[in-house]
Each structure stands twice: as structure tokens, then as C-alpha cells.
Amino acid sequence: MNYFILVLVSIFALIFLYNLAKLSTKKLPPGPSPWPIIGNIHLLGANPHTSLANLAKIYGPIMSLKLGQITTVVISSSSMAKQVLKNHNLAFSTRFIPDALQAHNYCKFSAVWLPVCPQWRMLRKVLNTKLLSTNRLDENQHLRYQKAEELIDYCEKCSQQGKGVDVGQIVFKTNLNLVSNTLFSKDLVDLCSDSKVELTDAILSIVDVAGKINLVDFFPILEKIDPQRMRYRTNIYFGKLNKLFGDMTNERLEEKKTNQSEKSDILEVLLNHSAENPEEMDQNYVNSTLLDLFIGGIDTITSTLEWAMAEILRQPEIMKKVQVELAEVVGKGKPIEEADVSRLPYLQFIIKETLRLHPPAPFLIPRRVDQDVELCDYIIPKGSLVLVNAWAIGRDSSFWDDALVFKPERFQSLELDMRGKDFEMIPFGAGRRTCPGFPLALRLMPAILGLMLNSFNWELEACIEPKDLDMEEKFGVILGKAHPLRAIPSRL
């Protein structure tokens, strides 16, 4: 009996040593030596995108770190991004889901977080053919125009009073009403009011929590403890949103029963699809899709336009140049149609340059590998977190001349596609997980920015000199300005 136990123990020992030897032969990408227990978490700092970009200058464009228990691979060049997002797209297509976003099983019904599977394909098809198609965007153009005009009316009042405008806040409210009308056919906020709305408060709270470092993500053993109470908080917020979306759904279904005129908004489309395909889409999918559209349609555009205005105010000559183009093509002070944007190349260059220097999601959406993957003679172990540092790629001095300088003119001689074909600039990602909302963003951002610049001159509040404008970043799910941009409009 003792002999049998000894043999059994020996077999297990050999298996263990074999697996250990096999693991040691896996060649990880280079990276800093980890500390015991915490690994390299101490190297992240307040702005991980910046810290990891600096480390990549030492260890190279593909780099590995140990963040707690999680092996993390960071991609920091366009050629490596192409390997991950195109050449090995399927192997890197699964999302790394933050623990906080697993509350109420939200991630199991979201096109953003689901793995590539039949449910994900169904949702992407609905998004691409019914919600964000060219025809649907064309049908809603009048709505975007109306909300942009309301923004200009608000700026006109501020101009008459000599009052400064919180650029990020007013663009956020405009986008919020635009998205809420597209989704529900109703405004959620008054541009002139500071009152809070439960729906937006819950969404912003989720975005805020999801953008913070959560120890559970790096030490899964802490999942049940939830030491920072992050999942506890998002559980409350998701509960509120599910109730609010459920109430809106029930209200709409009651309207349909009374034969009131059918609306053409996204809620109507989702409910019709759900009624026709009940086995495909239930209320969980409806709620998660609405939330995905809210987050993707508001913060990304708001952040980009605030950064664009900040960069323009730092270089007044850029404002003058784009205003000349607008006056020649559209007419000074006249409204801008989305169709005009194709005839406004310098305005488009400004948007491109803003997305290069200030990509909304600095790491795109984190990914995870479900099995060992060989990449450029390295092994990415199963379960690894993979970060594509789009912020670093857009500032890569080996490709970009004067990489840290905001210079829209560079695109006069540089043809780059922002929709994932050219990997030197990937603000919307690339491959099968490209952001489905980029067609709307590329219509909306230049139209709103052009309208603001064609209606007013802008100068910094409190007599701040352009060169002294604070450009500090605030890291999160969306990379925003640490300090709000305030500027005074005056009629052209």
C-alpha cells in the first residue's frame, strides 16, 4: 500500500515538474521584473497609458508585465497592432471584462463584451443593418441638425452676456439629447439647467467606476470580497438602469396597444425585432444595447470635441484657417449640413489630428486570449490581458513627424483611414471588434465642431494665454481633460 502511494506521489511529481518545465519554455515578451505579489502594478501610475508608453521605449513594442496574478501584454506599435487586430484577429477577439461590469450579467448581453458567438453576431447584425446603417443615419440627420442648432442658440445667449461656456459640458448635454431622441424620441436635459437626471447619473457613475483600477481584476481571488466595493456600486447602478429601461419599454408597449402612431426610434426597432424574434432578443438584450449606445454615443464624441477645441484655442491660427475654409465653402455664419463635410478637408484634418493625439479609449477595449497564442516568436499565455496602446501608437515618433505637435496640415500629404485599415491610427479599433458607431461619430464630430467655429470666435476665459492652457489628461474608460475647458464665444 505504501509502495502504491509512493508511486502515485512520484507520478504526480513528474507531471508537475513536466508542466513546470513546459511553462518555463514559453517565451514571454520582454518586460520589467515583477515584485512579489503585486507584480508590476506599482509601475502603472495615475496615467497607465503614459507609463506603459514610456516602458515600451525600454522593452519594445510588445511587452509583458505581471499585474497581480494577471499576465499582461502591451502592444505599442502599428505593426504589432496589425498582428493582433488583423493577422491574429480571432485569437485576440475575446474581451477582458472588468469585474465591475459583470454586475447584473450586463456583459452577457452586450455586443461590446460578448465573445464572438451566435449572440454577438446577432447583435452586430442588428446594429449594422437596423440601428447604425447608412439609411438609418440619413433618416436621423434632421435630428442631429436640430440638436446642433440648440447648442448654437445656447452659445448665442452666452455670447450676448459675455459669459464663458463649459465646452465639454454643453457638448455632452447636446449629445445626450441627441442620443436620447434617437433612442427614445425625447430630451433628457435642458441645456440651460444644471439639474441631474437619474438615467445619466447612473450611466456616468458606471463609466467612472469602470475607469478606475480595481484590485479584483488583477487578483481574482478577491472577487467575493470586492474590497473596493466596485461591483457593489455598479450592481446598484445597473439595477436602476434596468428598471428605467424596463419602464420605458412598458410605456412604449402600452402606447402600441392603444394604436398610437408608431415611432421610428431605436427603442421601437429593438422592440419590433424582439417581437419578431423572441428567441433571439429579450429585455436583457434590449437593455444592454441601449446602454452600449448611450455610452458609445456620448462620451467618445464629447471627449474628442473638447480636445479639438482645446487644441484649436492653443493655436489661434488654426481657428482662423478653418474659419476661412468654412466661409468659402459654406458661408460665414451659415448652418452646416453633414454633406458639406466632404468639401471641408481642413476641418476633417482637425478631427483626424485630435483622434491621433487624444484617442477616446487609450487602450481601446482590453482583450483576453482564451488559449496560448504565438505572436512574433513569443508565447502569449492563455488568460492573458492584452492592451493595445492606441495613445502610444498615435504618438510614435518613428512614423509621425513632430509627433507631439498638433498639426492638422500633416494630413494634406498623408492618406490614413481611421476605420481600422491603417494601423498607425486606430481610434475606433480594427478587425471584427471595430466600434460599430464610428460612421455616426465621423458624421457628427466635424459637423458640430464646424458649426461652432462658423458661428463664433472663441477665446479662453479669465484672460488665459493660449500657451498656458492646461492640457492635463484624466485617465478612464474615456480619456478626458483633467480640467474642463471654458471659452467665451463672440459672434463672427
Image (tube, rainbow, N blue to C red):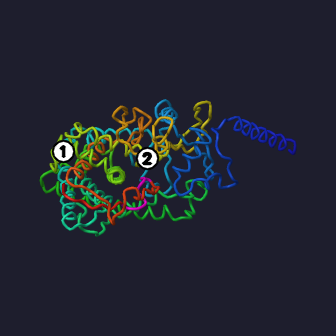
What residue would you read off at disc 1?
327
Looking at the rendering, the stretch of residues picked out in magenta corresponds to 477-484
- Pointer 1 and pointer 2: residues touching (CB < 8 Å)? no
Q: Within the magenta stretch, is there residue 483?
A: yes
Residue 225, placed above or below residue 440: below
Q: Quadrant of residue 73?
A: top right
The picture places residue 231, in percent across and down from the top left corner, at 49, 61
Of labels 1 and 2, earlier in sequence is: 2
Q: Is residue 59 visible?
A: yes
Q: Quadrant of the C terminus?
A: bottom left
What amino acid is at disc 2? Trp
Residue 182, placed above or below residue 123: below
Image disc number at residue 113: 2
Left or right, 340 with reference to 482: left
Depth check: 241 or 160 in front?
160
User: Tag 2's secondary structure?
Assistant: loop
Left or right, 118 with reference to 445: right
